[in-house]
Amino acid sequence: MSNGADGSQPKVAANVDLGDVSLNQAVADGMQRVETLLMQELSKGEAFVSEKVLHLTKAGGKRFRPMFALLASQYGTEPMNERVIKAAAIVEMIHLATLYHDDVMDEADKRRGVPSANARWDNSVAILAGDILLAHTSRIMSELGVETVAHFAETFGDLVTGQMRETIGAGEGDAVEHYMNVIREKTGVLIASAGYLGGVHSGAKPEYIEALQGYGNAIGMVFQIVDDFIDIFSDTAQSGKTPGTDLREGVFTLPVLYALQEDTPVGEELRGILTGPIHDDATVEHVLALLARSQGRQKALDDVTAYLNEAERHLEALPECATTDALRNLARFTVARVG
């Protein structure tokens, strides 16, 4: 497995205990093959190009999407075959490409614990690094066939739509509905694609593939809402994150949006304060205290529960086995992160 940017081994999703020894080993082996393929493919071309493309790859990451593709392939007649490994790799490469582009749009300084590409080089280099990732991805997709190319054309259309939707903003529309559409398009669809491709390229039954897609979309919604929840309500020592980072950047996530809609003194005060980014610590602390008193926390948790239940319903369409248990536990573990 490739070394991280600091010379250490990157942390990948294969380190997660899936609750079954043989499944743990199979996924760890599969993730090693995915990582090897990533390094081989992204090292192709001119050195000055591959250096930039490998920047975030070497930094590690959870690698949840390729892991889910490998787990999805367990429902087929040929789990973790070479086509599945390629499918898992291209899902991660698409994800990496979106990170390069997102960091430019967000003017981010850090990504995966290292300087973002736009901070280390510049915006043009970061955009081009994302573009070359899409070129590498297209080459591998062509090896998997027209169906995979067509699927990703639709998926990438959704990803771009979500980014554009977020950039333009809700306008006069419902802010919560807008937020849900954005995270479905930016997060849910790519995790759903991992389930789809893992199932398709392992020979899984159509009903299993549909269930895996549905689970992936639902769990993507859970992941994003929980991440946003942690930004506001977590303890720094527990999460490693500074509470209120999104507020400082003027990004209002689900608990905040619900709180802003409240017809209460708390909601009224928040509407007076939250008109853009917050630049001083005292105001951030005050807003966090107001949010703790609001209904936003509980309403966001209710949505998490609803998406978790949706994920569970999709799992009911899959056979009971170690893989289904693993997917069920992964969903519950994600929700448990809110404390």
Image (cartoon, rainbow, N blue to C red):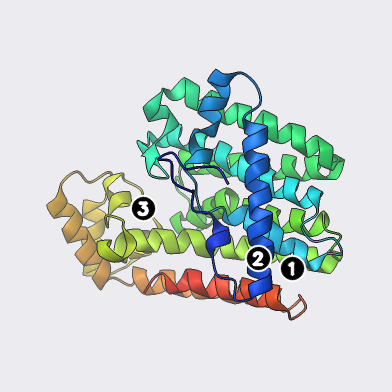
Tag count in the figure?
A: 3
Q: Is residue 191 visible?
A: no
Disc 3/disc 1 C-alpha distance (Å): 32 Å
Q: Are marks 3 and 1 in contact (CB under 8 Å)?
A: no
Q: Earlier in the sequence, mark 3 or mark 2?
A: 2
| Amino acid type, callout 1 | Ala
Residue assigned mark 1: 211
* For discs 3 and 2, the disc positioned in front in the rendered view: 2
For residue 230, which numbered disc appears in the image? none
Percent position of residue 107, x then y: 37, 33
Of 195 and 140, nearer the camera is: 140
- Considering every residue shown, the one lying at the far left of the view is 282
| Amino acid type, callout 3 | Phe
Report the side of 262 relative to 287 (left or right): right
* Residue at image point 73% right, 33% down: 138
Percent position of residue 251, x then y: 36, 48
Report the side of 110 relative to 327 (left or right): left
Regarding mark 2 in the picture, which secondary structure is present there?
A: helix
Q: Which quarter of the figure has residue 54?
A: top right
Residue assigned mark 2: 25
Percent position of residue 121, x then y: 41, 23
* Residue at image point 21% right, 52% down: 273
| Amino acid type, callout 2 | Gln
Report the side of 299 relative to 44 (left or right): left
* For discs 3 and 1, the disc positioned in front in the rendered view: 1
* For discs 1 and 2, the disc positioned in front in the rendered view: 2
Rendered view: 135 above or below 330: above
Q: Is residue 84 visible?
A: yes
Q: Dot 2, how many residues are within 10 Å of its Cα: few (below 14), some (14-19), or many (20+)?
A: some
Disc 3/disc 2 C-alpha distance (Å): 41 Å
For residue 252, which numbered disc appears in the image? 3
